[in-house]
Amino acid sequence: MMRSDIDIAQSSMMRPISEIAEKIGLKSADIIPYGHHIAKVPVSLLKCLEENPCGRLIMVTAMTPTSRGEGKTTTTIGLGQALSKIGKKAMIAIREPSLGPCMGVKGGAAGGGFSQVLPMEEINLHFTGDLHAITAANNLLAALADNHLHQKNAPPFDSRDVIFRRAIDMNDRSLRQIMVGCGGKGSNGVLREDGFEITAASEVMATLCLASDLADLKMRLGQIIVGYDELGKPVTALDVGAPGAMAALLKHAINPNLVQTIEGTPVFVHGGPFANIAHGCNTLVATRMALRMADYVVTEAGFGADLGAEKFFDIKCRAGGLVPSAAVLVVTYRAWQLHGIKNIAKHVENIRQFGVSPIISINKFLDDPADGLARLEKECVSLGVPAIMTDFREKGGDGGLDFAEKLASLADKPGKFNYLYDIEATLEAKITTISTKIYGADNVVITPDAKRDLKRITNLGFGNYPVCMAKTPASLTDNPKKPGRPEGFSITVRGAKVSAGAGFVVVYTGDVMTMPGLPKDPAACHIDIDETGKISGLF
């Protein structure tokens, strides 16, 4: 019988965090302990590490996933452990879990089985409070913007054109559309429509994840557009006096969180933007820091290569000057059964378009049929790319030693990395390039509302920003009910918004939402705690 993730995590022996820090060259004075097994590493330390050689950056992505995910995080963690076991100095850099998925349907984001980060319960719940700090900073800006309207402060802006929304780190469909300023005959503020985004989809989250240090974060926060005046001129967080206090709330959140895997490999777990409605990568500062501390850094981009990987290459690598050495494509039997080999081939093609060499990890599940896995492996090899079976969940690092050897060899001979599009191309051209080259669409349909949005964004001087496509992860198209590798379809763009703090333009396609809802049987209904404080039901 398969042991649960939480049972394995709770029975694992954790090392003191100072011991983990020593593995990457840090002294006790260099870290800020949060108990015995978690620490923050000051972002200011990055300047001291700049003379260290830069390690190889390995990005883990996947084929189009099923609703339960294909084990990218488990593979990322297991691979880091495997690289350590074959004698490589390795580190892992991944995102923090959001409480929404933890309490919803997907579960946490700490890996699985014997390829997990510890302490699993703390990481999946409140951890070091980063997401709470981001939520607070987000809602401070929302409160200051509404107070600015209520007090009729200068510069004035139009209550009908407020674009900044409140945030909460929970799936709550009831908050997608709300009214604020109700009652009180005006004493409760200006009556207007508003709504909530999940914290992981917020601009403040994306801004923190792409900031290079605290000063850069404060500057970026000031650039966030909260609304527009009657002439269409943007009013920013700086205009309503927010960036100083917001940055103060995020003083500790900008520092990467250091933890460990079950096998003691050092891990940064920091930042958590969604990949279907944000850019889906851990923080830039954590990745940069890890690259100066290890010879191989394994990181992850959310969902399939059409979403997280494209954004990792075109947004994060561009913003941070990162050069990836190789990419791992996670493939599973169940996803192959749903989407077929043509879907896998498309994701291989997508990775190669960036000049990056892919390698396929066939992530084995306990109930996968042996003959089915053999057929899958044969079809993957026929694509002309290395494909190796891995079992990181049940065997930890030992479940992918051959894979780690092959990957290290591949990463040591990186190709010539390139971006998908020219940053100076028009927003429409960037959208078309992503839609046709990455998704495989025949064309793009831009609605009249979206055309107005793109025109305004361009006229404001943001036309040279990269594009962050908000699209369903369940299909290469913008329709989640179209599996495989569809042909003869169009991508419909229904709106766009500039995230000036993060430094990209969000483009909304299909019916994608920035606030998920809970399922009929939420995971939260199965999470419990006993009288000793032992948590159960997390996965």
Image (spheres, rainbow, N blue to C red):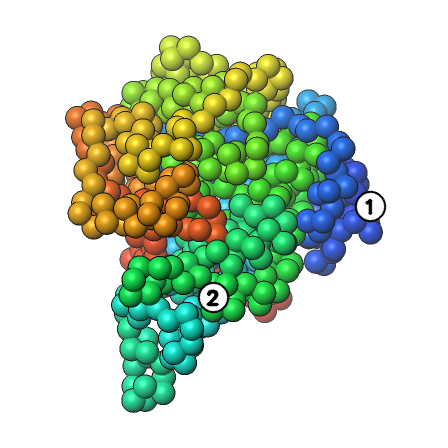
Farthest residue in the front direction?
231
Under mark 1, the amino acid is Lys
Numbered badge on residue 464: none
Establish if 122 lies above or below 306: below
Q: Is residue 242 left or right of residue 101?
A: right
Q: Is residue 476 left or right of residue 72?
A: left
The residue tagged 2 is 239
**What residue is rendered at 38% in x and 10% in y?**
382
**What residue is rendered at 57% in x and 42% in y?**
284
Q: Nearer the viewer, residue 313 or 457?
A: 457
Numbered badge on residue 27: 1
Q: Quadrant of residue 226?
A: bottom left
Mark 2: give few (<14), some (14-19) or many (20+) Cα within 10 Å.
Answer: many
Q: Secondary structure at mark 1?
A: loop
- Mark 1 or mark 2, earlier in chain: 1
One can see residue 170 in this view:
no
Mark 1: give few (<14), some (14-19) or many (20+) Cα within 10 Å.
Answer: few
Mark 1 or mark 2, which is nearer to you? 2
Establish if 525 lies above or below 90: below
Q: Nearer the viewer, residue 434 or 529?
A: 434
Q: Nearer the viewer, residue 106 or 535?
A: 106
